[in-house]
Amino acid sequence: MASGVKDKVAILGMGCSRFGERWDASPEDLMLEAYNEAMQDAGITPDQLDAAWFSTHMDDVGTGRGGTPMSIALRLPNIGVTRVENFCAGGSEAIRAAVYAVAAGACDIAIALGVEKLKDTGYGGLPVATVGTYIPQWHPNAVAPANFAQVAAAYRYKHGLDAQTLKRALAHVSVKSHANGAKNPKAHLRKAITEAQCLSAPTIAAPLGLFDCCGVSDGAAAVIVTTPEIARGLGKRDPVTFKALQVACSNGWEMQGNGWDGSYFHTTRIAAKRAYAEAGVARPRDEISLTEVHDCFSITELVTMEDLFLSDEGGAVGDVLDGAFDAEGRLPCQIDGGLKCFGHPIGASGIRMLYEIYLQLNGRAGARQLGDPRLGLVHNLGGQPSQNVCAISIVGREGV
């Protein structure tokens, strides 16, 4: 019977490029930034790598369709490199493959790396996967702000909220993340903002304004994984290990029946329950120390707090306004600035989120370091509210 990955796989090293408008750097340059940091952190040489997984979403921005672009850019020692993609959760999918390979005993040391050069596409948002951009707003492939704005409308209706209260909560989500991102030298956007700025910003798709939407960015991130025994043998005392790694994909239920009201993310609730069970987490509000969630829009982060059972149903607005998820709150969220401040290079985001948790658990987060975090949760969402994939990882010190 399956027993999960709890404490079977350790993080040996991680790296992350600076995210932003990286006109100066090719995808290969960004990969190298993340890879060099990860290898130095791991304290290994390329010949010790057994396998690699490569996450990228766009085919036509210099990275190609297979695993060879990563292998060539990094001059990997002719190991297997597999390209993976799962909407915006591709980075987490690469992590899952590497973790499972180590847990299965198929290799001793594996690397997962994600990269994207979205600025080079010239598209102001995630590129659409259709011919042309003339798409009816009701269509499931409509532009992302329109789809996620519908989540906000459904959530407001379901819980009887007045428009101003919801807008203030959404503004607080963004203000909090920008305050955190201002302390992060690798973030794309590093300026603090005010609630007044959020509330008076241009509307993108009501009720979402300019500061409710994450930006377009370039970036790369990498993680090297191995067994705890090998990690300790390489000098890593008390290594950070995976406690759970779960993925849930929509099966059409949301769009093909009337059971879903559009106010939450069904896959997140399923993946969260599975992840907590795998990790042995019975009281997530008490046991999880910090979270990195997929805040492509401020409403996504707010709703995700309920989907992760970190807020009561309908209670996230109150928790957000009370500062529960601020840096000084009971459960800090997006302590690095999140997608809101890093932007969303699709293939890299899932690994970038894990990078922050890893730094925090090792006490290496600098000005944004939290006191003594024990367990961190990464939530990576891909696709649209009505048809998506959700990946959740829980990591912490071995034995915690």
Image (cartoon, rainbow, N blue to C red):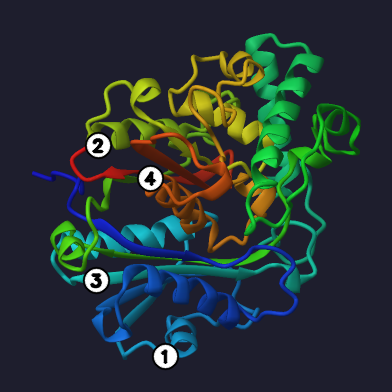
Of the numbered discs 3 and 1, the one sitting upstream in the chain is 1
Which residue in the structure is indicated by mark 4?
A: 361
Classify mark 3: helix, strand or loop: strand
Camera-near label (1 vs 4) is 4
Of the numbered discs 1 and 2, the one sitting upstream in the chain is 1
Residue drawn at (78%, 23%) of the image = 167
Question: Going by the picture, which residue comes out furthest to the left?
Answer: 1
In terms of image quadrants, where is residue 329? top right
Of the numbered discs 2 and 4, the one sitting upstream in the chain is 2
The type of residue carrying mark 3 is Ile
Indicate the quadrant containing the N terminus: top left, top right, bottom left or bottom right: top left
Q: Are marks 2 and 3 in contact (CB under 8 Å)?
A: no
Q: Which mark is residue 109?
A: 3
The type of residue carrying mark 1 is Arg
How far separated are the C-alphas under marks 1 and 2?
Answer: 36 Å
In terms of image quadrants, where is residue 119? bottom right
Of the numbered discs 1 and 4, the one sitting upstream in the chain is 1
How far separated are the C-alphas under marks 3 and 4?
Answer: 21 Å
Residue drawn at (20%, 49%) of the image = 5
Which residue in the structure is indicated by mark 1?
A: 75
Where is residue 68? Give x, y as percent. 44, 86
Q: Is residue 210 left or right of residue 248?
A: right
Where is residue 289? Give x, y as percent. 41, 32
Classify mark 2: helix, strand or loop: helix
Residue drawn at (16%, 65%) of the image = 230
